[in-house]
Image (cartoon, helix red, strand yellow):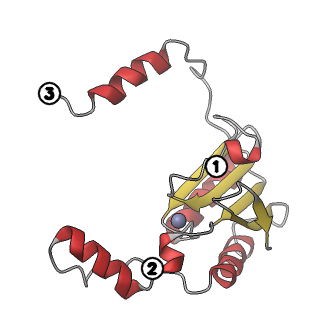
């Protein structure tokens, strides 16, 4: 019994009218988004885009990590990106819990010690967003022609609020 069969079945359905064959994978709309892994976020639809339009990098909290910067540099130089949106969100688990509380919750689920696991909680979401936007904008391989914006997505209204 394949535990992925429901998803593979859906995939075969998806592929019946697949239109992206041969597409080179640039960001057609010139957009890159760094956002949280949160399932309440639909990064393309929330800004009126669709598959093929944007590069999307997701992690807990929507942080501009080293890996996110690698993605952005590639996106800017090789994949047509000239606007970067950094988008954390309201009611984010890594911005509303302390490191200790998150570790306690995971330890409860895991039934084992998790003190060695870091979760990189965010203490001040808006201030952190400012630092993350700066990390992108000041990167030596991100030219001034690239616009970088920082936004908070409200998971209860669907609205973005620009902070930077
Ligand atoms: Zn989140």
Q: State the residue at coordinates (63%, 79%).
A: 125
Viewer-closest of 34 and 39 = 39
- Give coordinates of residue 152: x percent, y percent: 70, 67
Q: Are marks 1 and 2 in contact (CB under 8 Å)?
A: no
- Asked which secondary structure carries label 2, the reply is loop
Q: CA distance from mark 3 to mark 1?
A: 33 Å
Q: Are marks 3 and 1 in contact (CB under 8 Å)?
A: no
Q: State the residue at coordinates (63%, 59%).
A: 155
* Badge 2 density bin: few <14, some 14–19, many ≥20, Cα 10 Å: few
Q: Which residue is disc 1 drawn over?
A: 43
Q: Quarter holding the C terminus?
A: bottom right
Q: Which residue is disc 2 drawn over?
A: 120
Q: Which residue is disc 3 drawn over?
A: 1
Q: State the residue at coordinates (50%, 52%).
A: 39
Residue at the far right: name it. 145
Q: CA distance from mark 3 to mark 2?
A: 37 Å
Above or below residue 13? Residue 118 is below
Q: Is residue 138 visible?
A: yes
- Give coordinates of residue 138: x percent, y percent: 73, 76
Badge nearest the viewer, 3 or 2 = 3
């Amino acid at each position: 019994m394949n535990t992925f069969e429901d998803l593979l079945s859906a995939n075969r359905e998806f592929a019946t009218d697949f239109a992206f064959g041969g597409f080179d994978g640039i960001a057609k709309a010139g957009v890159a988004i760094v956002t949280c892994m949160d399932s309440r976020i639909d990064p393309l639809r929330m800004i009126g885009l669709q598959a093929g339009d944007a590069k999307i990098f997701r992690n807990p909290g929507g942080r501009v990590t080293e890996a996110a910067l690698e993605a952005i540099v590639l996106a800017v130089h090789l994949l047509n990106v000239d606007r970067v949106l950094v988008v954390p969100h309201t009611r984010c688990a890594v911005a509303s819990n302390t490191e200790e509380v998150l570790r306690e919750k995971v330890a409860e689920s895991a039934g084992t010690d998790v003190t060695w696991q870091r979760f990189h909680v965010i203490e001040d979401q808006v201030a952190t967003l400012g630092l993350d936007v700066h990390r992108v904008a000041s990167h030596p391989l991100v030219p001034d022609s690239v616009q970088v914006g920082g936004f908070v997505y409200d998971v209860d209204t669907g609205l973005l609020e620009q902070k930077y």
